[in-house]
C-alpha cells in the first residue's frame, strides 16, 4: 500500500465555516491577531487571549467536516494516509482520519504555562483564568503562537521522507516552516496541489495543480489517484 502524505491548511477548514486569521483581515474585533496569538499578547492581556480562543472553540463546536476531509478518509481504503495539518481544529479527526499530526497545536487542548509537557483536553468550550495544571500553573491554549517553535516539524519531516505521494490542500505554501516540508519528500514522489488560487510550483518536483476548492478538488484527485496508482 503506497504512503500518501497530505499537508492541509486553512482552506480545507474554511469550507466548514471556520474563519482564519486572514479571513478576519488581520483583525479580531479591534485587535491585531498577533495580540491574541503571541507570548507577548498573553503576558499583556491573558483574559483577552482566553476569550479569543473560547470564541473559536464555540465556533468549532458547531462545525462539521466537509467533503474535503471525508475524501481523505475514503482514500485510507487504498493508501496509507498520513495527514499533517496546519489547522488547530479537529475536523480531520471528526471525519475519521486515523493518522493526524497537528503542526500548530490543537484548539480543544490546554497546556501548562509552567510545565509545557503537561497537555489536557478542555472540557466544554471555555478555558478561564484560574484553570490550572496539576502542579498549580495557569493553563494556556495549546497553540503554537507567533514567535514560538513548531516542535512537531522533525516528526512531520520524518513522515514526508517516506511519502510515495504528496498532497497539498488548502494552503498556499507560504507559511514556514510548514511549507518547507515539500522539500523533505523523496525527489521523484509526485506532488498534487489543490487550491482555488494559483500556487507557485515547487522547485524540481513533479507536480499536478488542481485549481479548485478543497471539497471539489479532492474528488478530482481521488479519481486521478485511483486511475494511476491502483
Image (tube, helix red, strand yellow):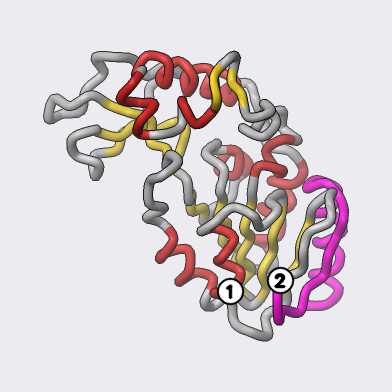
Residue that sits furthest to the left in the current view: 135
Mark 1: few, some, or many residues within 10 Å (few <14, many ≥20)?
Answer: some
What segment carries the magenta color?
Answer: 203-230
Q: Is residue 118 visible?
A: yes
- Which circle marks residue 35 in the picture? none
Q: Is residue 121 left or right of residue 135?
A: right
Residue indicated by mark 1: 183
Looking at marks 1 and 2 on the same chain, the residue that comes earlier in the sequence is marked by 1
Against 2, residue 218 (above or below) is: above
Residue that sits furthest to the bottom in the current view: 188
Q: Is residue 121 visible?
A: no
Magenta stretch: residue 222 in it? yes
Q: Quadrant of the C terminus?
A: bottom right
Image quadrant in which you'd find residue 110: top left
Q: Residue at x 53, y 53 (%)?
A: 98
Residue 15 appears at what percent x and percent y? Answer: 75, 35
Q: Count numbered badges in the picture.
A: 2
Q: Quadrant of the N terminus?
A: bottom right
Residue 200 appears at what percent x and percent y? Answer: 77, 63
Mark 2: few, some, or many residues within 10 Å (few <14, many ≥20)?
Answer: some
Q: Residue at x 61, y 65 (%)?
A: 5
Label 2, secondary structure: give it: loop
Magenta stretch: residue 166 in it? no
Against 211, residue 148 (above or below) is: above
Residue 131 appears at what percent x and percent y? Answer: 26, 18
Residue indicated by mark 2: 202
Do the numbered discs 1 and 2 sit on residues whose CB atoms are within 8 Å?
A: yes
Q: Residue at x 59, y 52 (%)?
A: 175
Closest to the observer, 120 or 34: 34
Label 1, secondary structure: give it: helix
Against 213, residue 28 (above or below) is: above
Amino acid at each position: 500500500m503506497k504512503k500518501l502524505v497530505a499537508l492541509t491548511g486553512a482552506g480545507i477548514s474554511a469550507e466548514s465555516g471556520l474563519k482564519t486569521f486572514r479571513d478576519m483581515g488581520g483583525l479580531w474585533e479591534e485587535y491585531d491577531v498577533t495580540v491574541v496569538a503571541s507570548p507577548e499578547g498573553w503576558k499583556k492581556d491573558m483574559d483577552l487571549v482566553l476569550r479569543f480562543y473560547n470564541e473559536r472553540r464555540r465556533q468549532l463546536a458547531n462545525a462539521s467536516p466537509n467533503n474535503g476531509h471525508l475524501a481523505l478518509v475514503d482514500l485510507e481504503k487504498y493508501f496509507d494516509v498520513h495527514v499533517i495539518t496546519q489547522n488547530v481544529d479537529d475536523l480531520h479527526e471528526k471525519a475519521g482520519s486515523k493518522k493526524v499530526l497537528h503542526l500548530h497545536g490543537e484548539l480543544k487542548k490546554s497546556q501548562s504555562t509552567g510545565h509545557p509537557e503537561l497537555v489536557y483536553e478542555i472540557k466544554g468550550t471555555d478555558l478561564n483564568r484560574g484553570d490550572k495544571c496539576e502542579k498549580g500553573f495557569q493553563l494556556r491554549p495549546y497553540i503554537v503562537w507567533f514567535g514560538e517553535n513548531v516542535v512537531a516539524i522533525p516528526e512531520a519531516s520524518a513522515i514526508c521522507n517516506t511519502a510515495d505521494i504528496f498532497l497539498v490542500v488548502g494552503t498556499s505554501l507560504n507559511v514556514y516552516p510548514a511549507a518547507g516540508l515539500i522539500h523533505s519528500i523523496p525527489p521523484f514522489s509526485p506532488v498534487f496541489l489543490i487550491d482555488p488560487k494559483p500556487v507557485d510550483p515547487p522547485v524540481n518536483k513533479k507536480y499536478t495543480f488542481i485549481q479548485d476548492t478543497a471539497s471539489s478538488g479532492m474528488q478530482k484527485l481521488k479519481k486521478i489517484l485511483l486511475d494511476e496508482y491502483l
